[in-house]
């Protein structure tokens, strides 16, 4: 199956971002000095559309290799940290999570299995478990996660899941409730950092099942 591409048209009969070549071609075919380019994902397409075509002209924008700007912005990961990640067989499905030392990959703790749960829930629980564990041990190091969703749930102290509560996932929702209560009643010095997977590869806590 062909991978999804997104097409940015800076100059054509109609400009914008299109999710198929047929639609894009209608706006650029036969149009004098048309400016357009395909991208491998929507995020890159949106960024490119807000910028100038000349910046992308002649560059390969459809590979999975990070562009130099991403590398420069990301820098190198801080190895004096802890990394957390979750894995789910099915989504919802059987979920588990873990935390490891970012540098050595030594396992710090593991949680699960949680049934009829989701990866986002696992990422959230992993973060809060890690915050509580580190506070108990006086560990002020930052924490890496590759989940923007989990970061926002921790920041806002609210879980925005569409996963319905069932008898099978009672353990999962009970853990969510305890995690939210912990966040509301505790402060912590640890910074929560985004692991830049596109630049650095899989987070050290990854379960390696992709």
Image: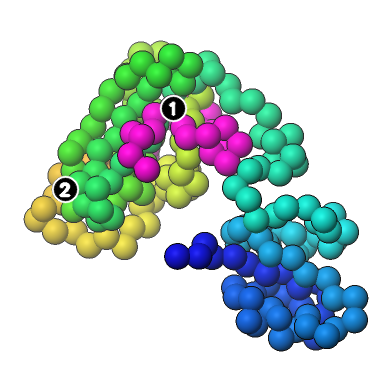
Q: CA distance from mark 1 to mark 2?
A: 24 Å
In terms of depth relative to the viewer, which is nearer, 43 or 62? 62
Label 2 environment density (alpha carbons within 10 Å; few <14, some 14–19, many ≥20): many
Badge number at residue 58: none
Residue 157 image position (x, y, % from top left): 40, 46
Give the main secondary structure of the magenta stretch: loop
Badge number at residue 115: 2
Residue at horizontal 57%, vertical 41%? 198
Q: Secondary structure at mark 2?
A: strand
Label 1 environment density (alpha carbons within 10 Å; few <14, some 14–19, many ≥20): many
Residue 11 image position (x, y, % from top left): 84, 75
- In this view, 137 is above or below 161: above
> Farthest left residue?
167
Quadrant in the picture for residue 154: top left
Badge number at residue 204: 1
Residue 98 image position (x, y, % from top left): 31, 30
Residue at horizontal 45%, vertical 49%? 149
In terms of depth relative to the viewer, which is nearer, 160 or 40? 40
Q: Is residue 144 left or right of residue 31?
A: left
Quadrant in the picture for residue 66: top right
Q: Report if residue 10 lies within the magenta region.
A: no
């Amino acid at each position: 199956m062909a991978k999804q591409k997104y097409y940015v048209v800076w100059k054509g009969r109609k400009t914008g971002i299109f999710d198929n070549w047929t639609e894009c071609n209608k706006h650029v075919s036969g149009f004098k000095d048309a400016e357009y380019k395909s991208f491998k994902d929507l995020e890159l397409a949106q960024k490119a559309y807000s910028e100038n075509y000349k910046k992308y002209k002649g560059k390969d924008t459809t590979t999975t290799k990070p562009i130099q700007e991403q590398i420069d912005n990301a820098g190198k990961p801080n190895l004096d940290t802890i990394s957390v990640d979750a894995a789910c067989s099915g989504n919802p499905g059987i979920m588990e999570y873990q935390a490891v030392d970012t540098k050595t990959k030594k396992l710090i703790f593991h949680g699960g299995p949680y049934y009829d749960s989701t990866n986002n829930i696992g990422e959230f629980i992993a973060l809060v478990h890690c915050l509580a564990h580190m506070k108990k041990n006086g560990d002020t190091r930052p924490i890496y996660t590759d989940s923007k969703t989990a970061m926002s749930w921790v920041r806002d102290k609210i879980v925005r899941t569409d996963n319905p509560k069932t008898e099978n996932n009672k353990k999962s929702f009970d853990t969510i409730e305890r995690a939210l209560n912990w966040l509301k009643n505790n402060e912590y010095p640890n910074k929560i950092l985004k692991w830049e997977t596109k630049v650095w590869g899989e987070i050290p806590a990854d379960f390696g099942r992709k």
